[in-house]
Image: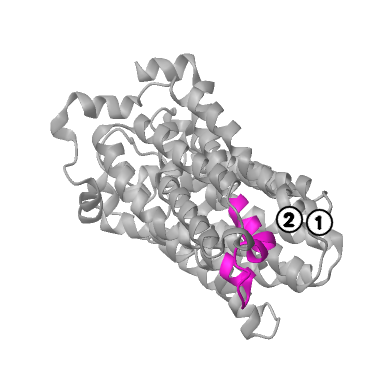
Amino acid sequence: MGTATAEKHPRKVIAASYIGSALEWYDFFLYATAAGLVFGKLFFDFGGNGTLIALGTFGVGFVARPFGGLFFGYIGDRHGRKPVLVITLLMVGLGTAIIGLLPTYQQIGIWAPILLVAMRLVQGFGAGAEFTGAVILLAEYAPKNKRGLWCSFAPAGGALGFLLASGAFWLVSQLPQEQFMTWGWRLPFLASIVIVAFGLWIRFRIDETPVYETIAKQPAQKAKNPIIESVMKQPRNFFVVLGARLAENGFSYLFPVFGLSYAVNTLGLPKDQLLFVLMTSYVIQIVCGMSFASLSDRIGRRPVYIAGALVGCLIAFPFFWLLESKSFAAVIAAFWLAQLAVGMMIGVQASYFSELFGPARRFSGFACARELGSLLAGGPAPALATAMVSWASGSSWPVAVYAIFLGLCTAYAVWMGPETYRDDISVDNAETQAMQIGQPQRTAI
């Protein structure tokens, strides 16, 4: 039944993944943008550096993500991929919409930041499995020789979410400052309701994946404790995912999120121009992500992923030099180069992480390892970078060094992992993958 759905309605399967990923990252980046621009003044106006505190709460969502990955990963492996896709979409979307309705600190005092953080936790808990579920849906339906390209639609949806979030904030930033700070910033959060409704309509209409349908027919194949088994049976792959996540997730928030805050609050560049540049940069990520994912179907996942991590290392210092020049063309180049590096990794990441775990424990292993990496890299990145710049008296060099460190860690982690682009993901490849340690990719035919 599932295979027939994929053959007759491939667009439906791709859309179900694409829309959900767009919503997840629309919501997460919306919060990140608001944290850098407005939340410090509206929710944390009780002394000290409100922007730093607001960016710190951005990381709270990442604390919840591994727990969401554990909880929903178990459901996805034991009860099916589709139920998780519906529940996580609701959690992320409704959490975002409620943020748009919250009163500010001036209106209800300390309850304002408490409620904001609570909704951030709801977002994070749902997002802990949303991307994983969207990717696995594609991976388990995709033709074997196009799995990289198919899976890249999930991160492409994520890039669309970033683009929509920055575009929404750019539009409302055109309002007079008083209106923007009073009610304008709320509109992008409330708009997530529309994406949720459309996403649910699509996801209710798809079938369970053919890989999971096979497992469901043979209950003995199901993992009793999928997260424990993913670590015990494939420990190296678990840590490969965690390490591979450091640069991709770190760069995703150091360059766009912190870069936006640094350019506006430290360098004094115009907010509306920066949001427009940021919006265009996500077009670069979409194009690069899908192009390099398709390339990985021919030459392997590892070489493309490692190249992306190293490109990020090379642009770390130039990114900030270009911003500090305050030239509009240079600022565009900075954000576009950053998205090239992120796109090379995130486009390949979707298929690679799916291929690293057996079908009975794929959801748990993928989700938990990926979200632990988020907690270590993306979550603290904006606040840590802000603190580094403050420590260095306004200089960006510590942030560039930190980015290079993340890139080198990821390059090493992926080099130590197996090549997977020709694997059959409907069977457990744990034993054959365990034999590969830092080997070159297999030669493409």
Up-down: is 91 above or below 277? above
Q: Please state the horizontal and vertical placement of residue 414, each as a whole percent of the image.
A: 43, 58
Q: Which mark is residue 45?
A: none
**Residue 218 appears in the figure:** yes
**In the drawing, does residue 381 fall left or right of residue 272?**
left
Would residue 368 appear left or right of 52 to someone viewing this image? left
CA–CA distance between discs 2 and 1? 6 Å
- Compared with 314, 173 (above or below) is above
- Answer left or right for 177 relative to 105: right
Q: Which residue is mark 2?
A: 181
Q: Which residue shows up at 70% across the image and 62% down it?
A: 260
Badge 2: residue crowd in 10 Å (few <14, some 14–19, many ≥20): some
Residue 219 drawn at (x, y percent): 15, 30
Q: Is 124 located above or below residue 153 in the figure?
A: below
Viewer-closest of 119 and 11: 119
For the residue pair 269 and 91, the one nearer the viewer reads as: 91
The range drawn in magenta is 29-54
Percent coordinates x, y for residue 369 in the rendering: 36, 55
Residue in the picture at 41% in, 53% down: 65
Camera-side residue: 409 or 31?
A: 31
What residue is drawn where x is 26% and y is 35%? 427
Q: Secondary structure at mark 2?
A: helix
Question: Within 10 angstroms of label 1, few (less than 14), some, or many (20 or more) residues?
Answer: few
Kind of residue indicated by mark 1:
Gln
Type of amino acid under label 2: Met
Of helix, strand and loop, which one carries label 1?
helix
Residue denoted by label 1: 177
Asked whether 256 or 348 is in front, the reply is 256
Specify the color scheme: one colour
- Asked if the residue at tag 1 contacts the one at tag 2, i.e. Cβ–Cβ closer than 8 Å, the answer is yes
Q: Position of residue 61 (x, y in %)?
A: 47, 57
